[in-house]
Structure formats: C-alpha cells, structure tokens
Amino acid sequence: MKNLGRALGFFRADGPLIAGALGLLLLSTAANLLKPWPLALIVDGVLGDKPLPGWLAGPAADRSKPLLLGVLAGAVLVVHLGQGALSAGQNFLTIKIGLRGLARVREQLFHWLQRLSLRFYQGTNTGDVIYRASWDTYAFQTLFQHGLFTGLGATLALGCMVLVMARLNGPLTFVALGTVPLLLLAMKFFGQTMKARSLAAHQTDSQVTSLIQQGIVALPLTQSYTREEHEERRFAGHVASAYEKRLSQHGSEVLYLAAMAIIFGMGTAGIVGLGARQVLAGQLTVGQLLIFLAYLGQLYEPLNQLAHIGATVSDASAGTQRVFELFDAAEEVKEAADARPVRGPKSQVSRPKSEVRGPRSQVQSPKSQVQSAEGGTSNIERRTSNAEISRAGGGGR
C-alpha cells in the first residue's frame, strides 16, 4: 500500500483531468443501468397488459401502441449510443492521464540517475538499470489505468446494479452476492504468490537485457578470442531461467483464472435454478426478469474485472517496486544548496591563414611553415591547427 500511494502521487498534477474522467465514468455507469429498461417497458406495457409508469402513460394514453413501440425502440438506440460515447471518452481520457504520468516518472527517474555517483554504476548491472528505466516504468501507467480506474469503475457498476437488483428480487441478489466472499478469498490466496513470481520474472528478464548489453560492448574482445559459442551457451542458460520464471508466473495466473471460472459457474448455476422457479411461480413479470437477467450479465463483468485486478496489480506493484529501488538509491555526492552553475571561458576559434603549395610538412613556431610531401609549403599562425589530406587518404595535423 505504501508503494501504491507513492506511485499514484505521480498523477496528482493531472487532478482536473482525473475529475473529468470520474465524471464521465459516473455518466457512463448511469447510462449502462438504463439499457434494459426500454425493452422491459416494451414487453410489459406494449406487448403485454401491464400498466405503464405514470410519466409514460400520461402522454401516451391517447396514442397507439405502434407509436409508443417506436419511441421506446428509439430510446434503446439512444441509450446504447450515449453509453458507448461516454465510455469511449472516459477510456481515452484515462489513457491520456496514464501516459502523462508515465512520462513524468521517466523524466524524474532520468534526472535522478544523472545525480547518482559513478560508484553506484560501477557496482550495479547497467542492463538491469536500463530495463527498469525503460520497461518497468510502464507499471505506473498500468497501476493507474487498469488498477485504479478499472477497479473504481467495476466497484461503482457493481454497487449500483446490486441496489437495483435488490429492489427487483432479494433472493436472487443474495445468491449473486454469495460469490463475492469466494472471490475475495481467491484473490488473497493467489495475490501474494503471483506478485512474488512476477517480481522474480522481472529480475530474470532484466538479466537477459544486461547480457545483451554486455555482449554488444564486449563483442570485439569476444570475436578476438573466438568465444562466441561460450557466450551463446551462457546466454542460453539465462534465457532458460527467464523462461522458467515467466512460465511459473503465468502458471499461477492460469490457476487463479481457473478458480475464478469455477466460482462464477457456481454462482450462475444457483441464480438460473432459483430464477426459473420464481418465473414459474409468477413472482416476477417478464419485463422484470429481462432486467434482472441483463443486470446479471453485467454483474459478472465488473466481478470478473475485480477478480483479474489481483493479477494486474500484483504485476504492476512488482514493476513499481523495482523502479522505486532506483529512486531510493543513496546520493553519495550531494550538491550544496547554494551551489552556483559552472561557467567556463568562452571558446574562440581562429582560422588559420595558410598558403598550400604542396604536401610534406615541417613545422616552425611561432609562425609555422609546413612543407608537404611533394615539396610545397604553407604558413600557419601560432595556436592554430591545420589538417591536410594527402592523395593516399591520410591526414596530418
């Protein structure tokens, strides 16, 4: 939790944009709740003999059912289009904020890396530092976009749908909510394992990056001693280790998703069985049943998102932890608070006044006379330099 708050602190500068994204999220959630209602009104009030709501029955009392059917069908289209537009706008704004925070993390990290002493880099794997600064920083965007906003949106949608479902049918709502404790237990059980394995996988991947960087730097020496096969075997060993760590990480994630599927299957079976009995007993209208079934389908989407957030947050937390280890590296050489910027003397470039009569050189000072290889001479002023390229392509200074 400490690293979570610290990571989200990089997004405080985008407070107004975050407020706008939250507003779009609220409107999108409300529009999503309205989706099944026009269809329920059509089934109960237009196709059936159930009374329409007062706000709709008054204006439509003297109108024909075909006209009312067209109005409600148009409402279905408007609600779906509106919800899609609001959701797209909220997702785009969230992505924008996530990328701005990612850029902020990278800028501050690069600034800090330049302040660390040479001793730090001499005792640190350079490839690992590059991997953390280039790839692990994406964890901040993932944590904000897929962790915070996806979790917040799923929780909001779940809470609103539960309230509406409870007003429609309490027993079915109770069966649906019976899966929540099982989901929480599975998230807690698998969460720590997935985070530990994800951290180990990140470390082995950074080792592979380090070997590539070291291999390129030492390539002339490797080729001189014909050590290519040895380096390839050493690299293959690290690749195999990275493969095993990643496979272990994804194996735990697959088991986690399998547990989620089993829990969802148990909840769906219970709701379908109890709901069918109530329909046969006439305790629900057809329109109410359609609303409940629509919410039931929407209910499992945020639950599924909340279930997957465990794996997402665990992987992102491992990445942010590796980045914070760089931020927490001790600054051995600290700059004084009243330090003044270094200003060197202004450089002046003087152009030599020379007369080239041929190549072969013979230098004299203060005013040098250069004789070229072919018998010509050139005059060069003191404190200046001159380069001459012969026909063979060599240079003289």
Image (cartoon, rainbow, N blue to C red):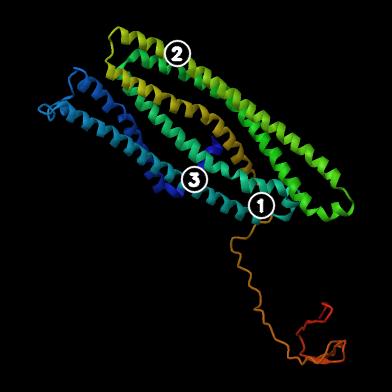
Q: SS at mark 2?
A: helix
Query: How packed is label 1: few (under 14 Cα within 10 Å), some, or many (20 or more)?
Result: some
Does 48 sit above or below residue 144?
A: above
Crowd around label 2: few <14 · some 14–19 · many ≥20 (10 Å): few
Camera sees residue 124? no
Q: Which residue is mark 3?
A: 98
The residue singled out by tag 2 in the image is 269
Q: Position of residue 137 (x, y in %)?
A: 59, 45
Amino acid at pointer 3: Gly
Image point 69% across, 85% down: which residue?
Answer: 350
Q: Name the residue carrying label 1.
A: 331
Number of callouts in the render? Answer: 3
Left or right, residue 250 beside residue 288: right
Residue 81, image quadrant = top left
C-alpha separation, residue under disc 1 versus residue under disc 3 = 29 Å
The secondary structure type at the circle numbered 1 is loop
Circles 3, 2 touching at the beta carbon (< 8 Å): no
x, y percent for residue 242: 71, 36
**Could you give the CA–CA distance between mark 3 and mark 2, rounded to whole angstroms?**
39 Å
Compare marks 3 and 2 and give the one earlier in the sequence: 3
Point 43% across, 24% down: residue: 300
Image coordinates of residue 82 in percent, x first then y, are 32, 39
Residue 328 vs residue 38, the one in the foreground: 38
| Residue farthest toward the front in the current orientation of the protein | 66
Instruction: Name the secondary structure under disc 3.
Output: helix
Q: Amino acid at mark 2?
A: Ala
Can the viewer see residue 79?
Answer: yes
